[in-house]
Image (cartoon, rainbow, N blue to C red):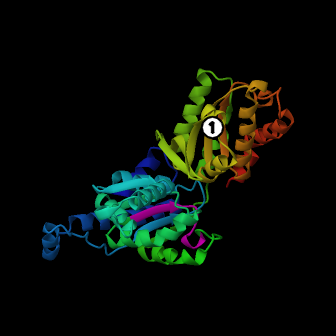
């Protein structure tokens, strides 16, 4: 596999514009790919074969580091990792959003703690890490971020076990390792994980000057009405352009012990239905979690609201406030122009602020402020 060759082919096909910073990271990914393939093809030492026969085989330890790629939103981090992941010929690999991965870990810990008798375990992370390592030589994490104290407290122990089992990690993040969980509670307990991450991963900053995500948004309409075939087509095209043609898949966010299902997401972009977000009994904590997780939101089928759906209108106000405060890009389809969304009913006065924000969020100045 020659990633650098593929990168140049995409440029020749006019799917990409050459970027020196991206190419430098691609070369590092190429080197990592070569190392992984060499490791996979390396004959096992005799004693390891014996150990495997007795059921205690441990993966060979790599003599090289993984890769942690950080940089501003829209610089191409996820695109580069996708190319690497899609083309590397490693059987046991997994690519997962970091938030989803940590939800799985917490669910596994909870399940392990319910075990009793001969099935009970002293350390739930031990079987969890062993299970992950048995299925993945390579773990690729998108959107690596640490905001939750529960995550922060287990990361060093979990990743020490994964690295000891021979797992190689590639991760993308908006933050350098030293910036993770920067103002978190008891951060001194988290800093050993930062040391571990720096030891096990080559940390590289992707310093591309252009925000390619914004390039895709600038010059495009982001509010489509009325709700007809054309609006649906425009929303589909915006999704395809922003995600590079990816279909997206369902995921979930854990919020105050509850699970909020996101029907379609990919690389920091989510597509939602108005009815699923504003007709359900959700609140500010849910909307803030969405705004903190995704840099771009597409919402389909916003109806014209009236006194009969004043609760939906109030939730929509809260939802837009959360997106606005977090500088999230918002693309939507609606029944009517933004100024006609809510003309009669409780909270019309408060809704005027939402109208103003929606109009600002359509502007080039707002989109550019995300850079």
**As drawn, which residue projects farthest toward the right?**
349
Picture quadrant of residue 270? top right
Magenta stretch: residue 144 in it? no
**Quarter occupied by residue 356:** top right
Q: Nearer the viewer, residue 158 or 294?
A: 158
Query: Where is 37 relative to 5, above or below?
Result: below
Label 1 Cα neighbours within 10 Å, binned few <14 / some 14-19 / many ≥20: many
* Observer-nearest of 94 and 132: 132
In this picture, residue 285 sits left or right of residue 52: right
32 shown above or below 275: below
Q: Which residue bears the numbered disc 1?
A: 277
Magenta extent: 169-179
Between 157 and 320, the one lying in front of the other is 157
Q: Is residue 371 rendered to the left or right of residue 88?
A: right
> Residue shown at 59%/21% (left/top)?
229
Q: Look at the image and say whether residue 171 sits in the magenta stretch.
A: yes
* Quarter of the figure that contains the N terminus: bottom left
Q: Position of residue 317 (x, y in %)?
A: 75, 40
């Amino acid at each position: 596999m020659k990633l650098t060759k593929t990168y140049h082919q995409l440029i020749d096909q006019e799917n990409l514009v050459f970027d020196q910073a991206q190419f430098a990271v691609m070369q590092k990914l190429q080197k990592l790919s070569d190392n992984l393939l060499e490791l996979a093809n390396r004959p096992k030492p005799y004693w390891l074969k014996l150990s495997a026969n007795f059921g205690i085989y441990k993966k060979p330890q790599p003599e090289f580091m993984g890769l942690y790629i950080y940089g501003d939103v829209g610089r191409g981090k996820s695109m580069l990792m996708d190319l690497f992941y899609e083309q590397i010929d490693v059987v046991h690999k997994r690519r997962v959003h970091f938030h989803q991965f940590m939800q799985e870990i917490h669910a596994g810990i909870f399940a392990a703690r319910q075990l009793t008798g001969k099935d009970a375990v002293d350390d739930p992370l031990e079987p969890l890490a062993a299970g992950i390592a048995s299925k993945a030589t390579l773990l690729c994490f998108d959107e690596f971020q640490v905001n939750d104290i529960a995550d922060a407290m287990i990361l060093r122990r979990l990743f020490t076990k994964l690295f000891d089992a021979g797992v190689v990690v590639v991760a993308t993040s908006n933050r350098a390792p030293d910036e993770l969980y920067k103002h978190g509670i008891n951060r001194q307990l988290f800093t050993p994980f930062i040391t571990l991450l720096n030891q096990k991963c080559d940390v590289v900053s992707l310093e591309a000057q252009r925000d390619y995500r914004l390039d895709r948004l600038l010059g495009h309409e982001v509010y489509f009405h009325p709700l007809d075939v054309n609006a649906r087509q425009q929303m589909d095209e915006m999704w395809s352009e922003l995600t590079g043609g990816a279909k997206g898949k369902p995921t979930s966010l854990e919020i105050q012990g509850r699970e909020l299902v996101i029907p379609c997401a990919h690389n920091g972009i989510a597509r939602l239905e108005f009815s699923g977000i504003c007709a359900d009994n959700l609140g500010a904590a849910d909307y803030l979690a969405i705004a903190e997780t995704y840099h771009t939101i597409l919402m389909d089928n916003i109806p014209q609201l009236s006194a009969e759906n004043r609760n939906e209108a109030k939730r929509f106000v809260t939802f837009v406030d959360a997106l606005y405060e977090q500088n999230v890009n918002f693309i939507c389809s609606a029944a009517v122009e933004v100024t006609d969304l809510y003309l009669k009913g409780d909270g019309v006065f408060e809704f005027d602020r939402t109208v103003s924000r929606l109009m600002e969020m359509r502007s080039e100045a707002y989109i550019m402020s995300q850079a």
